Every structure is written in C-alpha cells, then in structure tokens.
Image (tube, helix red, strand yellow):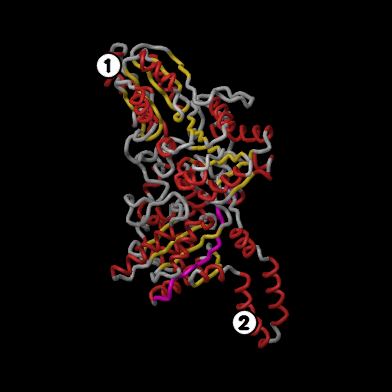
Amino acid sequence: MSSLLTSIHSPADLRRLSRAQLHPLADELRAFVLDSVSRTGGHLSSNLGTVELTVALHYVFNTPEDRLVWDVGHQTYPHKILTGRREGMGSLRQFGGISGFPRRNESEYDTFGTAHSSTSISAALGMALAAKIQGNGRRSVAIIGDGAMTAGMAFEALNNAGIADGRLLVVLNDNDMSISPPVGALNRYLAQLMSGQFYSAAKNVGKQVLKGAPPLFELAKRLEEHAKGMVVPATLFEKFGFNYIGPIDGHDLDSLIPTLENIRHLLDTDSGPQFLHVVTKKGQGYKLAEADPVAYHGPGKFDPAVGLTKPATPAKTTFTQVFGQWLCDMAAADDRLVGITPAMREGSGMVAFERQFPARYFDVGIAEQHAVTFAAGMACEGLKPVVAIYSTFLQRAYDQLIHDVALQNLPVVFALDRAGLVGADGATHAGAYDIAFLRCIPNMSVACPSDEAECRQLLSTAFAQNHPVAVRYPRGAGVGAAVPAGLEGLPFGKAQVRRRGSEVAILAFGSLLHPALQAAERLNTTVADMRWVKPLDLDVLRELAQSHSALVTVEEGCTMGGAGSAVLEALQAEGFNLPVLVLGLSDTFIEHGDHAKLLANEGLDAVGIEASIRARFGSLVRGPVPLKVVG
C-alpha cells in the first residue's frame, strides 16, 4: 500500500492533505476496498460508489463534531477505513470483528447505528435540533440513497425538516440501483433527469450556434438556468422547504468539495436545510461490479482479477430457492396468486417469478408498511397475495400486519426469509423475534419448516388457508432434504413425532430439529417435529406430556414470548405440571459472525442441546457421556 492511505488514521489527517492529494488518495482507497472485500466478503458495489463522496464529506466537515449519518450503512467501508479502522477491515463481519454497518459502540464517527433503510434524515434532523437546543454550531449530514428515498419514513422526515430550523444537509446519493433495481414514480423522475439526452444534446447544439453572438449566448445561459427548474427535481424538494443544489457528479472531487464548502457556509449562516443531489455509480472503478452491481452487492470471497465464479461443486438448494420455485409452481396452478416484495427481488428468490409472471409480480420499493396493506387490498378483492419479506423487515410493518391483515382475517401468506440468526449481517438483520410478535396476533398462524421439503409443503398448506399465515425459514441451505415436485401440503397445525425415547421429550420448532435429533441419539429422548407454533398440535403435546417426565423446547428465536412460551401456556391451560426446559436465543442482541459458531455460542447446536438437557435432567437421560466438541 502506498503512503497516502497509510498516513490517514483519522479524518483530521485527511484534512491536512492538499486538494491535489485527494485524487490519488481516492484511488488508493478504492483499491483497498476492493482488495479487502475480496478477502472477507461483504458489500462491494455500494462501497466502490461512495469513495469520493466519503473523502469529500470528511474533508469539508469537521467530523466527528459534525455528524455524518449514513442511511442503511452498507456503503460505509470507505468511512470506516478513513476513521481509524483500516487495520480492522480484515475482521469485517467476522465474530469479534468490526461490523459491516455503522455502530455507535464501534467508533465515535459512527454517529447513528443503521442497517435498515430510510432512517438517516430523521436521525440527522434530531441531531441538528439537539445541537440548536444545546447552543453549539454542530452540523448534521444525512447521506441517503435513491432506493431508500422510496420509503415513507424519508418523506415524513423531509416534511418535518422543512419547517425545522437546524443545520441540516441531506445528500441524495443517486446511483439508480438499490439492492434490487429501485422502482416507483420518484425513481422514474430521477432517472429521466439523469438520462436527459435530449436536454444535453439541445444544450450543446445551442452553445455551438450562439458562440458567435456573446449577448445571445449569455441570454441563453440565463434562460437555461430558469428552464432547469422545470427539468431537475428542485421543485419537489424545495416544496419541502429545502434549498436544492445539484445534480453534480459524485465521483468528481473538484465539483464535490467546492460545492460542499459552499453548503457548509450556508449552514453556518442559518440559511435553512440544504439538499445536495449527487450522482454516483455502483461498482465505480471495478468494471465487473459496474457491469453487474447486483451480483457484486454482497459477494463472498473472490479473486478481483477473475471476478465471481461458480463453485466447483454445486451448492445445496437454499430455503430461498425452494420458496422461489414453489412460488412459480403455485402461480402456474392458481391464477389468484400474486407475489409482492419490498425491494428484495433477488434476496427473496423472486427473479424467476418476475420473469414468468410479470403481471402478477409487484416490487413496491423499500416500503414494508405499504407492501403489507397493498397485499391486504388485493386480498379483499379475491386474490391470494404472497408477501416475500425478511423477518427483520416485517418488524417495520407490524401495525399494518395487525390492523390491515389480521384484524380483517385476510388470506395473506407471509414468506419470512432469514428467520433466526443470519451470520455476518448481525443483530440488525437477525430474525429473532417473529415467533414472539406473530403468535400473539389473533387469526395469525405461524409455521416452522424443519427442512427444505417441509418448507415447500408448508407453503402450500399456508396458501390453502383462508386466513393470514406466516411461514418462517432460515437463510441458506438446510440438510439437503429431497424437495417434492408436487404442491401437496402437510396437515394444518399438526406435528410429527420423529423419534421415540424415554423420560424426556424434545419439541423442536424449525431447522433446529436436526441438532435436536443428534442430541437425542446420545440421550435416548423423544423428538417431535412441531412444524407449527400457532396453532400448536395439542394432541401431540398432551400425549408427550402424559408419557414423559420432562419436556424440552428448542427454537432459533427469542425465548421470551417464543415457541417455548407457547408450550408453557398450553400446558398450564391443559392442567399439566411437569418441568420444561426452554432453549432458544438469549435475551440479548447477538453479534455478527459465522452462523454455526453463533448457534454453538447460544447452546443451540447438538453439543449445546445435549449439555443443557444433561445439566437440567441428568437423572432422566442416559448416563454421562463425554461431550464431543465440534470444530
């Protein structure tokens, strides 16, 4: 690595550089990001696109005193590198290492913890008005992408900020590419502006014609400035009370820095909230990522000289792929099915569905609340909506889930991907709470498939119901179970006893059935594949409670209010009084890291389940056997 980047340990070092040095620094920073992500995996395209913007912001603003709030935060690797975490990038998204998103407890430069979209303007406005109340001149900057601008929360914040009197700058990082291609009227508005070939060509022709007549050329320039108001989105944001500036090239430091310096002056003279529109390109500087920013959005380890390659051995089928295939097959069988996603086409496995059934595919943008109520409206008219959404993102639509779907008992299927722990993305993306927050809602049912085959079958069961049903399944592949080709479902609300033992029975919910079965072989315990959290199979529960001395529940979800709690409530209602051990995720936000390691740390692998059962019910299981530590 050359000396410029290695000399930067904080933004104060950056601000000591000359303007001329910033260009080679940006080149070094981009090369470092590419090399680093290729070694660890992580978000790439978005970070390559924010190199110059990050350099310019830290160069012009007095961070960390001035607050930078990054929306979503998956584009902050350049920010982390420039703020003293360059050496830590080798541990990115690994257990005990630095996070892939901003975290307040990681650095004073991470002023607001993020990972879900569209929160930056609200947070930065809060910081700006706090500074005013506290009587200091601190500035606040929100950096938000065009995809995140599709969410209602961003516009709620703009509406509030326009009448607030704080030193706030909103930077719209317009790259025309969120995780999935962004959609909606606002995106079309911005895209038309950026692709203004007619406007650009007409302007250039006019310049050539009028060069020989300086007075007319000057008049044309003035008319152009007035005409721009009809072309650029200035009117939209100025109606919110912002002073709109732009659009400018987000990769041109010679434009970015003077513009930001002018804006800083406007903020210091209390000229009201400012809005800067910058245009960037995801994957900038790395041709393979520029050509396919979606593929390089979050790659694993790879050779930058070669690019992404297919694995030598075919990977196991993932739960996401099982869902995607089921969605296509069920849509072919039932023309009432419509598929809805809040901007997660690729992540939720809906690419093939969009291609095969474009008229029945709806990407509503990063707008989870709207997605759920939109589905409710369709269900009212006799359609059968399937909302494909990550468990962590369904949290954002909880009011709509209750009031607009469940209260009206509408037949909406929620396909909850990324249920349980998600590994490298950490606590912000973990689906730890869906069982607890879903099972308390009247009319709602919750299914937990244990493998890929059950995932397909339980999706069919859910679709056949005339009320809302959520099917939760984990990230990645399962045990490699053969997936049936048909669309037959499993019995609604029914469990299956998978192993008979003595004294202790394990009630497994979801994919933890398999480590539970491994532990049961060593303990000689009964194991039930519960399949449903709501409704619980009371027949199986009664039978196991009557024939065993103790029960154990296992789930990859929070124990407080989760499936184990449901079992305890049911046993109490049935009049049973036997000991129950509840195993699940502890009452803490679980760090990022390897999924298997995280499960082991929570005692939810086979070794941990066995150890917990021996510790609680040692006299009821086979004699002590040395635990086999894996890894």
Any part of residue 21 in sight: no
Crowd band around label 1 with a 10 angstrom C-alpha radius: few (<14), some (14–19), many (20+):
some
The residue at the point 42 percent across, 24 percent down is 508
Which circle, 1 or 2, is nearer the viewer? Answer: 1
Q: Position of residue 390 (x, y in %)?
A: 49, 41
The three-letter code of the residue at mark 1 reads Gly
* Residue 432 occupies quadrant: top left
Q: Position of residue 46 (x, y in %)?
A: 51, 52
Q: Nearer the viewer, residue 18 or 263?
A: 263
Residue 120: in magenta span:
no
Q: Position of residue 317 (x, y in %)?
A: 56, 29
CA gap between label 1 and label 2 equals 86 Å
Q: Nearer the viewer, residue 72 or 325?
A: 325
- Disc 2 is placed on an element classified as helix
**Would you name the residue on which mark 1 appears?**
618
Q: Which residues are magenta?
A: 270-288
Q: How many marks?
A: 2
- Disc 1 is placed on an element classified as helix
Q: Which mark is residue 222?
A: 2
Locate residue 214 relative to residue 606 in the image: left or right: right
1 or 2: tag closer to the N-terminus: 2
The residue at the point 65 percent across, 32 percent down is 329
Q: Is residue 403 above or below residue 442?
A: below
Q: Position of residue 499 (x, y in %)?
A: 44, 14
Q: Nearer the viewer, residue 572 or 163?
A: 572
Q: Is residue 242 above or below residue 174?
A: below
Q: Nearer the viewer, residue 27 or 210?
A: 210
**Furthest residue to the bottom?**
215
Crowd band around label 2 with a 10 angstrom C-alpha radius: few (<14), some (14–19), many (20+):
few
Any part of residue 196 in sight: yes
The three-letter code of the residue at mark 2 reads Arg
